[in-house]
Amino acid sequence: MSRSRHTTRKAFYFSFFIFHFSFLKAIYFSFFILHFSFFFSCSPGAGEEDLVLLFTGDVLLDRGVSPIAEREGVPYLFEGVADDFARADAVIVNLECPLADTLSPLGKQYVFHAPTRYAAGLRQAGITHACLANNHTNDQSRRGLRSTARALRDAGITPLGYGTSAAVRTQPTLIRKNGVTAALFNSVALPLENWVPSDSLPDVCQLRAEALAAVIHAYKAVHPDHYAIAVLHWGVEFQQSPSMRQRLGAAALASAGCDAVIGHHPHVVQEMSELETSVSVPVFYSLGNFVFDQTPPSTRRAVMAELVLTPDTLKARAIPVTLRHCRPVRGK
């Protein structure tokens, strides 16, 4: 009898600890997001003349997301953030799967794909640019990668970090408005599984942060008035703190003249900070997921990174979102 009471008491204390630990994690995340948003800008207050860029984390259109897209349509996946998309001049997502109708899968642990017709739905939702420099757009080999870029362009979406030569892949994509120019550089800073880089075939930019910093430094020497923004697929999956490699890479980018750093790949939100050089450089180490089917609570909390650019200033803020049934909605 006494042993039963002792076991019950231990179970009670364990449940009590787990509940409070989860509660404190949720409070910490909420404070973290609010503090960061206030730290950069409580409200960027974008005017009609400003260039507004909105960046998101990983967008998966396969596995658990696919039945929803088939039943409700691709634009439905983004309805919870439609107002944010509408306020931005450009919406840049990380497309975490190839768009291919003919399958030619690589030998990998996780292999994704979605039909090319989904590209039109992405554009209808308000997406203007898609990062292809990640570890999944090659899942259907070079044929699938080429198909993805073609489908996006046909739908009016600009692919980033893609090309048939190293020179093309490292060239920035320019976004202009009222005399303000943003130059977007996209690279995956991770080894790609079962993949051999090519200088003359369809491929993605695979420069590590330090190598990309050299490219940005050279670009800024010629275009000092352009805002250089690095969008990197990097870090360690499910790790809620940036790795030392990420921190050193961000510092190298900032020192090279990069004006903002946007990251994804870990599937969770990581620390966000401001690096001081001659200017303040906002660094979003990881935005987390955006449209995804993972279920752990940490993978269902995310942020969008909003940059508001004027000829003289760059303002940044994190916009918290929560993934509900694979879809992002505003709030925590």
Image (cartoon, rainbow, N blue to C red):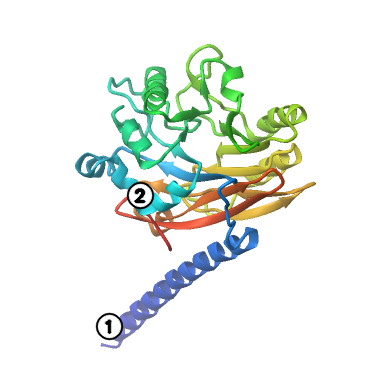
Is any part of residue 207 visible from this angle? Answer: yes
Residue position for label 2: 294
Q: Marks 1 and 2, how far apart in space?
A: 38 Å
* Residue 47 location (% of width, % of height): 58, 51
Q: Which three-letter amino acid code belongs to the residue tagged 2?
A: Gln
Secondary structure beneath label 2 = loop
Residue with the most extreme right position: 278
Secondary structure beneath label 1 = helix
199 over 237 or under it: above or below: above
Closest to the observer, 69 or 198: 69
Q: In which quarter of the image is the C terminus?
A: bottom left
Residue position for label 1: 4
Which residue is at 39% across, 74% downward?
19
Is any part of residue 112 visible from this angle? Answer: no
Q: Which three-letter amino acid code belongs to the residue tagged 1?
A: Ser
Label 1 Cα crowd, 10 Å radius (few <14 / some 14-19 / many 20+): few
Label 2 Cα crowd, 10 Å radius (few <14 / some 14-19 / many 20+): some
